[in-house]
Amino acid sequence: MGRYAFVARRAISLIPLLLGILFLVMLLLSLAPGDPARMVAGPRAPEAEVARIAHELGLDQPIWERYAHYVVQILQGDFGTSFKTGQPVADQIVAQLPVTLTVAIAGVLLALLVTVPLAVLAAKRPDGPADHVIRVLGTLGIGLPTFWVAIMAIRLIALPTGWFPVAGVGDGPGQYALAMVLPSVVVAISITAPMIRSLRATMIDLHEAEFVVAARTLGFSGLALLRQFQLRNAVPPLITVTAAQAGYALFGTVVVEVAFGLPGMGQGLVVAASTRDFPLVQGYAIVFAVLVVALYLIADVINAAVDPRVRISA
């Protein structure tokens, strides 16, 4: 019962954060230059027509009224209607969400596959040759702009080989899978370095921990010591940093999807922001926010389940 109460308390505590993010997005949109009603009506529409459209869209109302109205809409499952397409925002998000989640999840999994062995190798001999090489590569990974890495992946891999699509997701499951490869690799490159640095530091600290020293005196060594005592205790901090980098990967998909021309939420957000499509931008913002806070909630729940030191009933 304590675990269910823990999850419920954590979920409820995130509601004010989501409401605050939504209000901030609406405030920034209202302060941005340009008139959405004018964009909908057209550049040559008379002022009376622009005023009529603004009234129909509720753009002439104070921001507090629009905010309250939108929150009520969301609670009813209605994300509004796009100014530009006239289609329900929820339908557009549902159509684009799988692409974004595929790129982000695949990128995080690739990052984990690289992080664990490299971090263990670097921590085995701190300041050794392997540690220096891995740290230099990590520094390069942090310093390289994601958009530049995506462009280089297209120019150096996709175009010369012809193995991967350079725009869109193609037709069929096979083409879709190939279209996800390079974007996922680019996302993985952007988040791997912080994960390696975090796990490396944890492994170095555990190397001299009392229980690890005691395990050595009992005859544990090599893989048995690493698996049963070091990696097991490194899991909770790794889960936390993975959740943080997964949130970064979600927002990184905005850049990656634009570079690769993927029809995901990232590219949709850029187009909606450039056309001042308020309902669509607000819908994307609330979905991204929910996904990020859900990641942290999941990380807390997993840590509570795997780490006996966490008293979830407290």
Image (cartoon, rainbow, N blue to C red):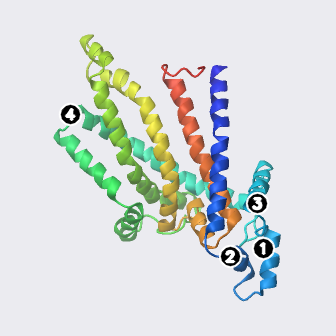
Labels 2 & 1 near each other (Cβ < 8 A): yes
Residue 5: x %, y % from top left:
66, 25
Q: Which mark is residue 54?
A: 1
Res 45 quadrant in image: bottom right
Mark 2, secondary structure of its residue: loop
Mark 1, secondary structure of its residue: helix
Please name which of the two marks, 4 or 2, marks the residue nearer to the observer: 2
Q: Is residue 26 visible?
A: yes
Q: Alpha carbon of mark 2 to alpha carbon of mark 3: how far? A: 16 Å
Q: Is residue 223 visible?
A: no
Residue 179: x %, y % from top left:
49, 61
The N terminus appears in which quarter of the rendering? Answer: top right
Amino acid marked by disc 2: Asp
Residue assigned mark 3? 66
Q: Residue furthest left?
A: 129
Q: Residue furthest top?
A: 218
Horizontal arrangement in the rendering, residue 93 relative to residue 54 (left or right): left
Q: Give the vertical position of 148 relative to 136 (above or below).
A: below
Please name which of the two marks, 1 or 4, marks the residue nearer to the observer: 1
Res 25 quadrant in image: bottom right
Q: Alpha carbon of mark 4 to alpha carbon of mark 2: how far? A: 60 Å
User: Mark 4 or mark 3, which has the lower sequence index?
Assistant: 3
Residue 39: x %, y % from top left:
69, 78
Q: Alpha carbon of mark 2 to alpha carbon of mark 1: how far? A: 9 Å
User: Mark 3 or mark 1, which has the lower sequence index?
Assistant: 1
Residue assigned mark 2? 35
In the image, 198 versus 24, the foreground residue is 24
Q: Alpha carbon of mark 4 to alpha carbon of mark 3: how far? A: 58 Å
Q: Alpha carbon of mark 3 to alpha carbon of mark 1: how far? A: 12 Å
